[in-house]
Image (spheres, rainbow, N blue to C red):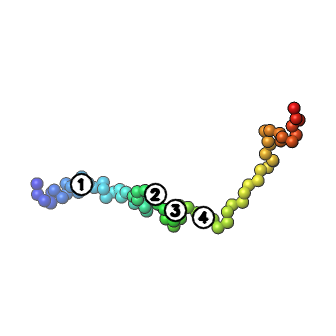
Amino acid sequence: MPEEQRRQKLAACSRHRFRYIPPCTPDNFWEVGFPSTQTCIERGYIREEKKPGERLRRRRPFCALFSPKSSQEPS
């Protein structure tokens, strides 16, 4: 088979490769293992807030299942 005909045949068979370009992998996708905490903060995986969130208060007080010992009658 002549060289020119061989190139044309190869181009005709592998033309689909030029139609679809696979997406690029995300940054640090192929890194194996766990990154350090500092690295995670730099990459934006962990967000540290300067001011901690406000603690939530109960709407109604917690109901104790047992009564206090002082209210029990001695037997």
| Residue type at numbered disc 3 | Thr
Numbered disc 4: secondary structure: loop
Sequence-first disc among 4 and 1: 1
User: From the viewer's perspective, is the residue at label 4 or at label 1 nearer?
Assistant: 4
Q: Secondary structure at mark 1?
A: helix
The residue beneath circle 1 is 12
In the figure, residue 5 lies in which quadrant? bottom left
Q: Quadrant of residue 31?
A: bottom left
Name the residue nearer the viewer: 2 or 42. 42
**Res 58 visible:** yes
> Which residue corresponds to mark 3?
37
Q: For the residue marked with disc 2, what is the amino acid?
A: Phe
Horizontal side of residue 6 vs 14, given as left or right: left
Q: Earlier in the sequence, mark 2 or mark 1?
A: 1
Residue annotated with mark 2? 34
Q: Residues within 10 Å of mark 3 (few under 14, many from 20)?
A: few
CA gap between label 3 and label 4 equals: 11 Å
Q: Residues within 10 Å of mark 2 (few under 14, many from 20)?
A: few
Q: Residue furthest left?
A: 1
- Is the residue marked by circle 1 packed among few (<14), some (14-19), or many (20+) residues within 10 Å? few
Amino acid type at circle 4 is Glu
